[in-house]
Amino acid sequence: MSGRVLRAASSIAALLLGVGSGTAWAQDELFVPNNAGNSVTVYARTANGNVAPMRTISGAATGLDGPRGLAVDTVNNELIVTNSNINSITVYALTANGNVAPLRTLAGAATGLNNPQSLAVDTVNNELVVANAFGGSSIRVYTRTANGNVAPLRTLVGAATGLNSPWGLAADTVNNELAVVNPGLSSVTVYARTANGNVAPLRTLSGAATGLNGPAFLAITTAAAPPTPTPTSTPALTPTSTPTSTPTSTPTAAPTLTPTSTPTPVAPAPGGAAVPTLDSWGLIALSVILAALGILAIRKMSP
């Protein structure tokens, strides 16, 4: 009994903490990188006025140096930050506070990081996408858990890409696309998510009519799945309701009523399947009743 209680308590705790359930802990918070202060401050999402942060990541141990962009990973409960001054990416627990060391640090010549600006975490494909403003203007993609001096999985770089000191980017996992802003050209370029090398964009948004003027960042909203067409839903309802109600009621009533109403001695079910119709609690109740009847019979027989 105590084992079952402990297992139930563990399950409840896992649901509350989102451990092992694939669910994210929704914190309802606002994360801000402070480039000049080498810190990341966290506020309540609805914070207003002159209010102190709930948490502050700051100090020598954090590895923060000119933090420019950040991404919140609510699936893995992590916070990822780009450090433009030292060409690194540092990763922290989502609830990190104070002068804490990062969980992982991506840095070194092999990474190709060069004045990293913004980044996006792709939890669908477990990848980290980073925009580098210097060193040829590039987009570099790493595994989400990359750590140390590791080379990127893919690199978008070259004249054909149309990249020019890219700052902001967004990963569209619904349409498998990557959108990038180029402040030097006042343009937005869009690529296939898996684009690699010196490849031309799928689309380029630029020109006087666009109103783009030194764009820095961007965000994408994707349309929800289209509603089910009427022709599909109409036939689906008719066959579903008709066969469901007819076979459900007929076989359910027939097998249930027939063995119950027909005396067992006259028409036993094949293999005696109709006899053990009671569950364990029913058998216990029947045993108690029989025992009580036996006791009453013995008392009546006693002088």
Image (cartoon, rainbow, N blue to C red):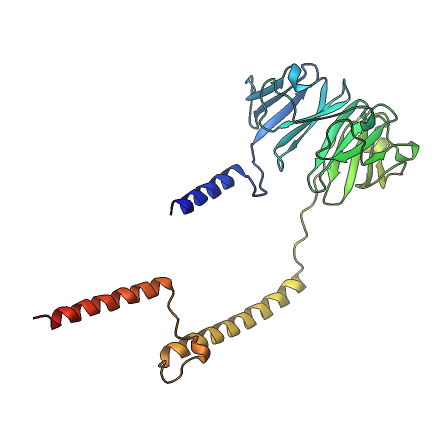
Relative to 108, is 90 on the left or the right?
Answer: left
Q: Position of residue 108 (x, y in %)?
A: 79, 23
Residue lying farthest to the right in this orientation: 159
**Figure check: 182 above or below 229:** above
Residue lying farthest to the bottom in this orientation: 266
Total numbered badges shown on the rendered structure? 0
For residue 276, what is the image quadrant?
Answer: bottom left
* Residue drawn at (70%, 34%) of the image: 145
For residue 259, what is the image quadrant?
Answer: bottom left
**Figure check: 81 above or below 225:** above
Residue lying farthest to the front in this orientation: 303
Compare residues 151 and 98 and report the one nearer the observer: 151
Residue lying farthest to the left in this orientation: 303
Relative to 63, is 178 on the left or the right?
Answer: right
Compare residues 58 and 267 and report the one nearer the observer: 267
Q: The C terminus lies in which quarter of the figure?
A: bottom left
Relative to 17, is 79 on the left or the right?
Answer: right
Q: Position of residue 78 (x, y in %)?
A: 63, 31
For residue 27, what is the image quadrant?
Answer: top right
The reply to whether residue 6 is in sight is yes
Q: Position of residue 45 (x, y in %)?
A: 57, 28
The reply to whether residue 211 is in sight is no
Q: Position of residue 77 (x, y in %)?
A: 61, 33
